[in-house]
Amino acid sequence: MSDYQIREPLPAEISDELSAYPELTRALLFARGITSAQEADAFLNPSYERDFHDPFLLADMEKAVERVLCAIKKNERIAIYSDFDCDGIPGGALLYSFFTKIGYENFSNYIPHRHAEGYGVNASAIEKLASEGVSLIITVDVGITDVGAVEHAHTLGVDVIVTDHHLPNRQAGPPTGQVGLSGEELPPAYAVINPKRGDCSYPNQNLCGCGVAFKLVQGLIARGAFELPVGWEKWLLDLAGIATVADMVPLIGENRAIAHFGLTVLRKSRRPGIQKLCRKLNIRMQELTEDDIGFMLGPRINAASRMDRPDDAFHLLSTEDEVYAEELAKHLDKINNERKGVVASMVKDIHKRIAGQDNSPVIVAGSPKWKPSLLGLAANSLVETYGRPVCLWGKEGAGVLKGSCRSDGSVNVVAMMERSSDVLIGYGGHRFSCGFSVSIEHVDHLLTSFSASYKEVHEKEHKKEIRTVDKKLWLDDVSWNTYASIEKLAPFGEGNPKPLFLFEDVTPSDVRIFGKAKDHLELIFQNGSSTVSAIAFFSTPESFSKKAEAGKPLSLIGSLEKSVFGGRKTLRIRIVDIV
């Protein structure tokens, strides 16, 4: 549960400096640290020429470009080895589009099977590619920690260019790869392009994996004598935009420009797969938003590897065949619905299994029947229900137990894993989301170990989270003029969150549950002769700090959003909390 405070008023001198913009836009710009007219213009009006950095500022870019151009000249067999998520798959499709456009045919795409091969570059795949005559592998969104596999490729006479954005390994013990700055260990590749390298001075360290692949294409076009229309590479920004939004990298600076122009290209995408998938999901392409990527397109691209073959999502993004594209769009939507059903069944099962964990600060559950690829989704749902960290495990491959842990915001789960390392095979991730692997012998010790670790890590005087509300609004302010002031700051995401507003002391005339499964909440407010709708998906009147009841006043925390359903535009409040 969070407490809320309203942001301080906009200082008069800043308001004067930003006077070219509506008052609400000024306040929202200031909340993002923007205090000058020049900064505001740069933020509100992304520029391809200004905001996209020189790709050759990336360490090893010159080497990588030289090697790829040499391979093209000699007609070497090239393999694009990409990760199986909604960053790696668009990245693989992006390089596929580039090679296809320049007329180079001696290449292939390879995406490891999530369940059969697992994450990363693996030796078996390297051997397979080498046996097919591949002499150069370009990775996308993967490879920075795969020191052994890259070394194996080298012994087989295969050069590897790693393009990735994940953190390199920290060196602990005798090095097997190259040792970079700050003790990091880099794979012994021909070139390693990663903005998070300690010796890389690239201005944007937060590119996603597909974004790094796009920079490689920029470099190749700059150095290669390809017969391409000037600016053709901008058509690839639909894929870079999907990945940048879906991978939740900070949408500021160059990433904001990638997302902005990515959405511009997506709205007129020439890709049959994107067109067919949007049609299947009733998304009007010309009005597609970052929310459509995050909640509609992204989950269906990810469903391919979670439930079936990742290649299906790759082919959706790369095919020129209209009929095949429609088949793939239907298939990905179908398996995404199946994924929802499997996760719902898993969550229902977990509710029964954790009946005795009421006094535990952490929820732990697992089953050899559960797919590790779905555990994070189930854990997210359970965190919402129980308000505690949730750690789940399942079985992958030959006896390997893998799990996902999600925090409720009260604890750093990676620090938790660190203190439980004696019962784990490995772990890694971020403050609020991480993965782990465990042996069968230690799986029964997880609840005790994680609970003890939680108590150690959790701050003794943990402060309640204070969330900042951008402004107090009235129901009269739910208007298209207000929305226009907010929309100037889109696309929203990590680093540029949707503005939050307080609607104080408002009384719903109706509280209803809707949807096929009756699992969504809508509040209706009378505002003179018109009505204002506020919704929350997968919620009930009891889901928030205060129960919502018709005829009883409440205060609403939420954002404004545009809904386009059945060709009709409506404006509504998306509920974040009821207090």
Image (spheres, rainbow, N blue to C red):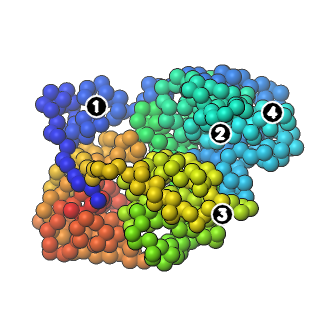
Task: Pick whichever of labels 2 and 4 is earlier in the sequence.
Answer: 2
Q: CA distance from mark 1 to mark 2?
A: 37 Å
Q: CA distance from mark 2 to mark 3?
A: 27 Å
Q: Quadrant of residue 232?
A: top right
- Density class for disc 3 (Cα within 10 Å; few <14, some 14-19, many ≥20) is few
Q: CA distance from mark 1 to mark 3?
A: 54 Å
Horizontally, residue 140 falls left or right of residue 456, namely: right
Residue in the picture at 63% in, 52% down: 425
Amino acid type for the residue under numbered disc 4:
His
Q: CA distance from mark 4 to mark 1?
A: 48 Å
Amino acid type for the residue under numbered disc 1:
Ile
Q: Is residue 261 visible?
A: no
Q: Where does the image place residue 426, in percent across and percent down from the top left?
A: 61, 50
In this figure, which residue is indicated by the disc labeled 4?
Answer: 154
- Badge number at residue 464: none
In this figure, which residue is indicated by the disc labeled 2?
Answer: 145
In this figure, which residue is indicated by the disc labeled 1?
Answer: 34
